[in-house]
Image (cartoon, rainbow, N blue to C red):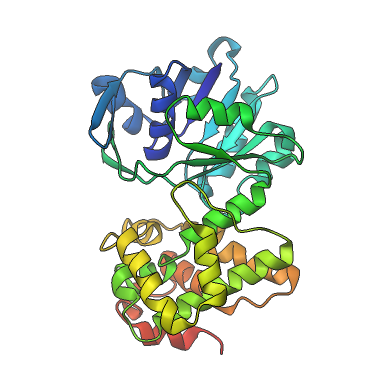
């Protein structure tokens, strides 16, 4: 089986590296700044007490990847969600035979453009719960080996067993899901915890949860998400190492005074003082944010099904205003009351 990793960053490098390590025909494709260190030093993956250095084939352009009309059985598109459309448009002219595209980007709705262009039978949705950190451009650190990957075909009735076996054989714990939308929404439900609020306030999630009023904001955000999922007929499902169903039960049923210490412990234990992805994007100076595929997508879905989502909509709006420079980040830096005032009652 020929596999192309389109976007060999932390996630692409990890998945592609493991697939290559266990005998698959893998090619890594990324920009020169990401690929050249791998060509020079090899791709090193450290997980628990094991460190391995690999030398997978690497290319820096689509033209090179598809030389002599080379085609692939599986193409993993592993860049940020906001880069997927450009990647899809760029690769489309090179595809001359049926190919399965696997999306691994976080967020809701990222598969839809691929489905529309290539057909649902050719699109495999993936949700990775394993956090991967880059020590540098050729050395990846797997921070939680107890997690893994969820897979689901986007065409109803099609099963992902073949692909589940592929990744399990590469020593990546992988499970199959029947409904890809439930899987992606469940992952988003986990991703939004302590994410947008932490980015806006520029404080670690554990600290945010101790700020007056912020726990109530987080719970309201999660309850809105669950109401939208219910209205859409989606089911909260667990992913490897992540108990989304338990979290959903607590948010729905447990009184806040009992839920707060539990959720605070989960957030502080899971992220601690490490800043979440939205804040990292913002601090890097990027003018784009994946919040639009999380809180923003939840708010849009709420409009479609008639469920009010004022918290998700406000978090998305404020974070995007900060990201694009419309609002100065200093207005919200460590100012929870300023954020609370913006949320409609």
x and y, in percent, of residue 62 in the image: 51, 24
What is the tally of numbered marks visible in this picture?
Answer: 0
Q: Quadrant of the C terminus?
A: bottom right
Q: Residue at x 38, y 33 (%)?
A: 14
Residue 109 shows up from this direction: no
The image shows residue 130 at horizontal and vertical percentages of: 40, 44
Residue toward you, 244 or 57: 244
Quadrant housing the N terminus? top right
Note whether 142 is above or below 255 in the view shown: above
Q: Residue furthest right?
A: 157
Q: Name the foreground residue: 109 vs 162.
A: 162
| Relative vertical location of residue 63 with respect to residue 5 in this rendering, above or below | above
* On screen, residue 240 above or below 302: above
Percent x, y of residue 243: 48, 56
Horizontal side, residue 332 vs residue 4: left or right: left
At which x and y percent is residue 278? 40, 60
125 left or right of 128 in image = right
Residue at x 40%, y 70% (from the top left corner): 263
- Identified at 58% across, 19% down, the residue is 72
**Front-lying residue, 308 or 173:** 173
Tell me the residue at 57%/65% (across/down): 296
Rendered image quadrant of residue 336: bottom left
- Residue 248 position by quadrant: bottom right
Residue nearest the viewer, comparing 152 with 322:
152
Query: Is residue 145 visible in this depiction of the protein?
Result: yes
């Amino acid at each position: 089986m020929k596999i192309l990793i389109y976007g060999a960053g932390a996630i692409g490098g990890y998945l592609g590296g493991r697939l290559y390590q266990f005998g698959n025909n893998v090619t890594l494709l990324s920009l020169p700044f990401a690929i050249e260190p791998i060509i020079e030093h090899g791709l090193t993956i450290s997980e628990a007490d094991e460190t391995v250095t690999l030398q997978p084939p690497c290319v820096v352009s689509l033209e090179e990847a598809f030389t002599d009309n080379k085609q692939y059985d599986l193409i993993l598109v592993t860049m940020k969600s906001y880069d997927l459309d450009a990647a899809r448009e760029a690769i489309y002219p090179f595809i001359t035979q049926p190919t399965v595209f696997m999306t691994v980007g976080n967020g809701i709705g990222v598969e839809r453009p691929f489905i529309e262009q290539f057909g649902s039978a050719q699109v495999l949705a993936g949700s990775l719960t394993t956090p991967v950190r880059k020590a540098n451009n050729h050395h990846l650190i797997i921070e939680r080996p107890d997690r893994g990957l969820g897979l689901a075909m986007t065409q109803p009735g099609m099963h992902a067993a073949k692909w589940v076996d592929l990744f399990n054989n590469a020593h990546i714990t992988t499970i199959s899901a029947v409904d890809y939308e439930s899987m992606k929404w469940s992952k988003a439900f986990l991703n939004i915890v302590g994410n947008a609020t932490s980015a806006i306030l520029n404080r670690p999630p554990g600290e945010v949860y101790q700020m007056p009023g912020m726990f109530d904001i987080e719970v309201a955000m999660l309850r809105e998400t669950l109401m939208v999922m219910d209205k859409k007929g989606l089911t909260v499902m667990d992913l490897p190492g992540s108990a989304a169903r338990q979290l959903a039960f607590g948010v729905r049923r447990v009184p806040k005074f009992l839920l707060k210490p539990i959720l605070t412990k989960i957030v502080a234990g899971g992220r601690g003082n490490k800043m979440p992805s939205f804040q990292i994007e913002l601090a890097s100076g990027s003018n784009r944010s994946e919040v639009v595929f999380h809180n923003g997508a939840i708010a849009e879905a709420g409009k479609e099904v008639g469920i009010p989502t004022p918290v998700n909509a406000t978090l998305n709006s404020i974070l995007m205003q900060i990201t694009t420079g419309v609002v100065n980040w200093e207005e919200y830096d460590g100012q929870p009351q300023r954020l609370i005032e913006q949320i409609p009652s």
